[in-house]
C-alpha cells in the first residue's frame, strides 16, 4: 500500500477548509522509512483554532474509527483514527504562528526543547501536501543546521548523570532493572551529543528510528549501530563494558570539536 497516496487522500479532507494554511507528511513516511507497522503522521497548520467539528468531520467522511482525541495541549491539538483499510492516521494540528515561532526558537536561538525540535525536524523532512507558500519558507529556514544549536546540543548532553558511576555496583548486585535504566539514559545522552556533532535535528524525544539516524551520521564511533545492539542484548556486564568503550569514543569525537565529556 502506498502510504503517501493515502496521506494525500486524507489531506484532501482538510485542504478545502479556509482555516488551513498548510498540510505535510511527517514521521517515518516522510523519510521513506515506513514498514508494515507504520502509521501516517500528518501535520496541519491553521490560521485559527480548529473546532471540534473541523477536526472530526474528516474522520466521519473517511469512515474512520476514532482512537484518541485530545484537546489543546502544549500548543497542539491531536487525534488518531484508523481508516477502513487498516491504516492508522496520527493528526497533529498547530497554529501557523506557533510553528513559525518554534522554528525561530530552534534555528535562530538554538533552543534544544524536545517538542519544538521534533516539530522543526518534521518541517525540515516533511513532504508538502498543501500550502507550499506557507511551508516552503519554513523548510528553507531549517536547511542549514545552526552552529548555536549544535553547540547547545553537545553541551546539554555531555553530563551522563551520577547514576552512571554506580554501574559496576549495579552489575554486582544484579540490579538489572535499574542498570538498564542507567544504560538507556546514558545512551540517550550520547545520542544528544552525536546529533549535535552531526548537525541532525532530533525527530523523536526517545530517539526513535535510531538505526536509520546512526547510518546517516558521519561523526560516530565505529560500528555504532551493532555496538548499541550489543549493549542491550548481550550479558549486562558485557553491555556495560561495550557502553564504556562507546563513551570513550564519543568523548574523543567531542574533544576534537573542543568539548570535554564529564568523566565518571
Image (cartoon, rainbow, N blue to C red):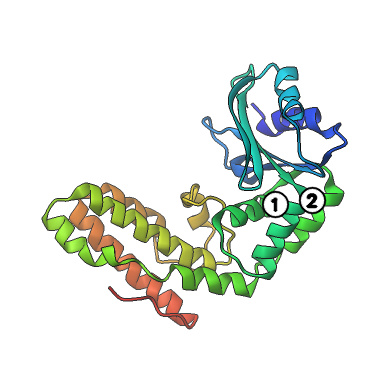
Q: Quadrant of the N terminus?
A: top right
SS for dot 2: helix
The image position of residue 115, as x and y in percent, is 58, 52
At 64% from the left and 51% from the top, the residue drawn is 119
Residues under numbered marks 1 and 2 in contact, where contact means CB atoms less than 8 Å apart: yes
Q: Which mark is residue 123?
A: 1
Kindly indicate the quadrant of the structure image that contains residue 201: bottom right
Name above or below for residue 35 compared with residue 65: below
Measured Cα–Cα span from mark 1 to mark 2: 8 Å
Can residue 89 be seen here? The reply is no
The image position of residue 179, as x and y in percent, is 24, 53
Q: Residue furthest bottom?
A: 258
Name above or below for residue 250 compared with residue 202: below
The image position of residue 78, as x and y in percent, is 63, 36
At 79% from the left and 31% from the top, the residue drawn is 14
Give 48 or 37, whichever is nearer the viewer.
Answer: 48
Q: Is residue 38 left or right of residue 61?
A: left
Q: Residue furthest left?
A: 172
SS for dot 1: helix
Q: Pointer 2: what residue? A: 135
Name above or below for residue 189 compared with residue 259: above
Kindly indicate the quadrant of the structure image that contains residue 167: bottom left
Q: Quadrant of the C terminus?
A: bottom left
Kindly indicate the quadrant of the structure image that contains residue 35: top right
Give 200 or 72, whichever is nearer the viewer.
Answer: 72
At 70% from the left and 34% from the top, the residue drawn is 4
Question: Is tag 1's residue or tag 2's residue first in the polypeptide sequence?
Answer: 1
Can residue 23 be seen here? The reply is yes
Q: Is residue 153 left or right of residue 181?
A: right
At 56% from the left and 60% from the top, the residue drawn is 113
Q: Which mark is residue 21?
A: none
The image position of residue 236, as x and y in percent, is 21, 52
Amino acid at each position: 500500500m502506498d502510504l503517501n497516496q493515502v496521506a494525500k487522500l486524507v489531506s484532501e479532507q482538510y485542504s478545502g477548509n479556509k482555516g488551513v494554511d498548510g498540510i505535510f507528511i511527517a514521521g517515518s513516511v516522510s523519510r521513506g522509512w515506513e514498514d508494515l507497522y507504520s502509521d501516517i503522521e500528518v501535520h496541519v497548520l491553521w490560521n485559527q483554532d480548529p473546532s471540534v467539528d473541523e477536526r472530526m468531520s474528516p474522520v466521519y467522511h473517511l469512515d474512520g474509527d476514532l482512537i484518541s482525541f485530545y484537546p489543546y495541549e502544549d500548543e497542539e491539538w491531536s487525534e488518531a483514527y484508523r481508516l477502513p483499510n487498516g491504516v492508522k492516521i496520527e493528526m497533529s494540528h498547530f497554529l501557523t504562528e506557533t510553528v513559525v515561532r518554534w522554528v525561530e526558537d530552534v534555528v535562530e536561538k538554538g533552543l534544544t526543547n524536545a517538542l519544538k525540535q521534533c516539530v522543526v525536524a518534521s518541517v525540515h523532512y516533511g513532504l508538502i501536501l498543501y500550502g507550499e507558500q506557507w511551508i516552503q519558507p519554513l523548510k528553507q529556514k531549517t536547511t542549514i543546521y545552526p552552529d548555536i544549536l549544535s553547540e547547545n546540543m553537545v553541551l546539554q548532553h555531555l553530563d551522563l548523570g551520577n547514576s552512571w558511576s554506580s554501574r559496576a555496583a549495579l552489575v554486582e548486585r544484579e540490579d538489572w532493572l535499574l542498570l538498564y535504566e542507567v544504560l538507556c539514559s546514558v545512551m540517550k545522552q550520547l545520542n544528544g551529543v552525536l546529533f549535535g556533532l552531526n548537525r541532525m535535528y532530533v525527530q523523536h524525544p526517545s530517539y526513535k528510528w535510531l538505526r536509520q539516524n546512526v547510518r546517516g551520521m558521519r561523526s560516530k564511533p565505529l560500528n555504532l549501530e551493532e555496538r548499541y545492539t550489543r549493549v542491550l542484548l548481550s550479558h549486562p556486564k558485557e553491555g556495560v563494558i561495550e557502553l564504556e568503550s562507546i563513551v570513550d569514543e564519543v568523548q574523543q569525537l567531542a574533544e576534537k570539536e573542543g568539548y570535554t565529556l564529564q568523566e565518571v
